[in-house]
Each structure stands twice: as C-alpha cells, then as structure tokens.
Image (tube, helix red, strand yellow):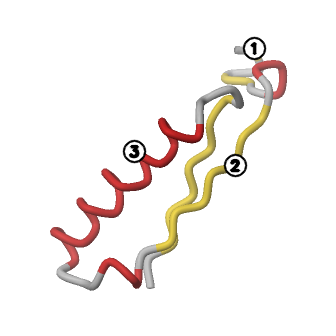
Amino acid sequence: MPIVTVAMYSGKSQAEKDRLAEAITDDIVKILKIDKKEVVIVFQEAPHGNWYSSGIRL
C-alpha cells in the first residue's frame, strides 16, 4: 500500500487538496498497476514561517 505524504504551506482550499490527491492517486494507480483503494495520501500543512531552506526562512 503506497502512502504518499505531501508537505505544504497551509491555506489551500479543500477542493484544491481533493484535486491534488486525485491526480497523485491516478498516477500511482497507472504506474504501479494497483487498485485505487490501496493508495493513501496524507497532507501535512504548516504556516509559511515554519519552512526553511539552507537555513533561510521561506
């Protein structure tokens, strides 16, 4: 069972997350040739101030 975690800034609408989860699921199903029921997508959201790259806040 593939479990995909998407880390992202908070603030996206539920509809946007639904569409993204569908697209990711569809690609996994096509590539791995598995049933849609086997795919789990988890969104982890955090405010902008919690993200850093190379020690610099994004």
Label 1 secondary element: strand
Amino acid type assigned to the residue bearing label 1 in the image? Ile
Which residue extends farthest front? Answer: 15
The quarter of the displayed image where residue 2 is located = bottom left
User: In this picture, is 44 found above or below 46?
Assistant: below
Residue that mark 3 sits on: 19
* Left or right of residue 34, residue 54 in this image: right
Q: CA distance from mark 3 to mark 2?
A: 16 Å
* Left or right of residue 1, residue 9 in this image: right
Q: Quadrant of the C terminus?
A: top right
Amino acid type assigned to the residue bearing label 3 in the image? Arg
Question: Residue 54: x and y, percent?
Answer: 68, 22
Residue that mark 1 sits on: 56
Question: Residue 24: x and y, percent?
Answer: 35, 55
Q: Residue at x 50, y 39 (%)?
A: 15
Amino acid type assigned to the residue bearing label 2 in the image? Gln
Q: Residue at x 50, y 72 (%)?
A: 40
Bin the neighbour count of mark 3 within 10 Å (Cα to Cα): few under 14, some 14-19, many 20 and up: few
**Depth check, front residue: 31 or 16:** 16
